[in-house]
Image (tube, rainbow, N blue to C red):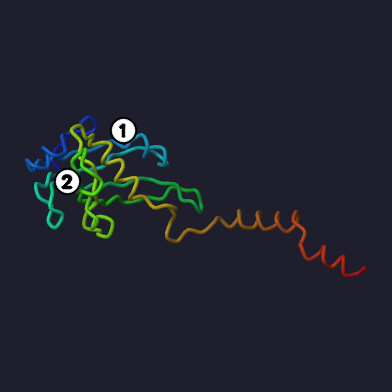
């Protein structure tokens, strides 16, 4: 992806089969604020993602047209351990085999379920680049974002431990009371 001024891809719509057949290529950026489903999981939806979408007339091994999507950028997620912001570096490199609309389910390649080389998706005459990128980024996010060396703050540990010890009686205390009788 180049350093020159890149276009905003938010309103870009392509005919996916024609784009793939022509070997089209578009590069640009998407503001995180324009990705509404992604913005819901971000601490702060600021910044943008760099994107490059290339049409591939014949995907090697797959036997059909496809798309090659590259997305890079940094997003801020909430650490599920300490609740502070944790940066996640998006580095997506997806190959997507296009299946013509109306094609019978049997025409979907069985290898698609077994291979990590590409994913199959239905072709569309009006494919929103924004929606495609957003879907791929959401799939790439960690299920439980967390710092690699995250520790709970010491004050929270001390306070939580003290409250638990004082408010919750030991379940064995009840048994000990029954044994005395």
Residue 67, percent across and down?
17, 46
Whether 110 is drawn above or below 126: the answer is below
As rendered, which of 106 and 170 lies closer to the eye? 106
Residue in the foreground of this view, choosing between 112 and 68: 112
Q: Is residue 23 left or right of residue 151?
A: left
Q: Position of residue 156 (x, y in %)?
A: 60, 53
Name the residue: 8% across, 42% down. Answer: 21
Left-right relation of 86 to 161: left
- Which numbered disc covers residue 67? 2
For residue 75, the mark is none
Residue name at image x 16 percent, y 38 percent: 16
Name the secondary structure under disc 2.
strand
Q: Residue furthest bottom?
A: 179
Q: Secondary structure at mark 1?
A: helix
Residues at marks 2 and 1 touching, judged by CB atoms closer than 8 Å? no
Residue 166 is situated, as x and y percent measured from the top left of the image, at 75, 56
- Residue at the image point whose x is 36% and y is 34% from the top: 36
Above/below status of 110 relative to 12:
below
Say few, some or many: other residues with alpha carbon within 10 Å of mark 1 (under 14 / 14 to 19 / 20 or more): some
Asked where in the image residue 46 lies, by quadrant, the reply is top left
Residue 164 location, x and y as percent? 70, 56
Quadrant including the C terminus: bottom right
Mark whose residue sits in front, 2 or 1: 2
Depth check, front residue: 156 or 139: 139
Which numbered circle lies on residue 34?
A: 1
């Amino acid at each position: 992806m180049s350093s020159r001024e890149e276009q905003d891809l938010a309103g870009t719509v392509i005919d996916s089969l024609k784009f793939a057949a022509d070997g089209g290529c578009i590069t640009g950026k998407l503001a995180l604020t324009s990705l509404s489903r992604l913005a819901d999981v971000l601490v702060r939806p600021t910044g943008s993602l760099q994107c490059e979408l290339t049409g591939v007339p014949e995907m090697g091994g797959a036997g059909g047209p496809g798309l090659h999507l590259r997305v890079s950028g940094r997003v801020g997620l909430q650490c599920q351990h300490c609740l502070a912001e944790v940066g996640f570096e998006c580095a997506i490199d997806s190959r997507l085999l296009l299946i013509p609309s109306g094609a019978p389910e049997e025409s979907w390649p069985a290898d698609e379920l077994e291979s990590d080389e590409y994913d199959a998706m239905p072709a569309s005459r009006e494919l929103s680049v924004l929606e495609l990128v957003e879907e791929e980024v959401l799939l790439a996010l960690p299920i439980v974002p967390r710092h690699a060396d995250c520790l709970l703050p010491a004050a929270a540990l001390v306070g939580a431990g003290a409250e638990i010890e004082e408010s919750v009686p030991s379940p064995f205390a009840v048994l000990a009371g029954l044994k005395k009788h």
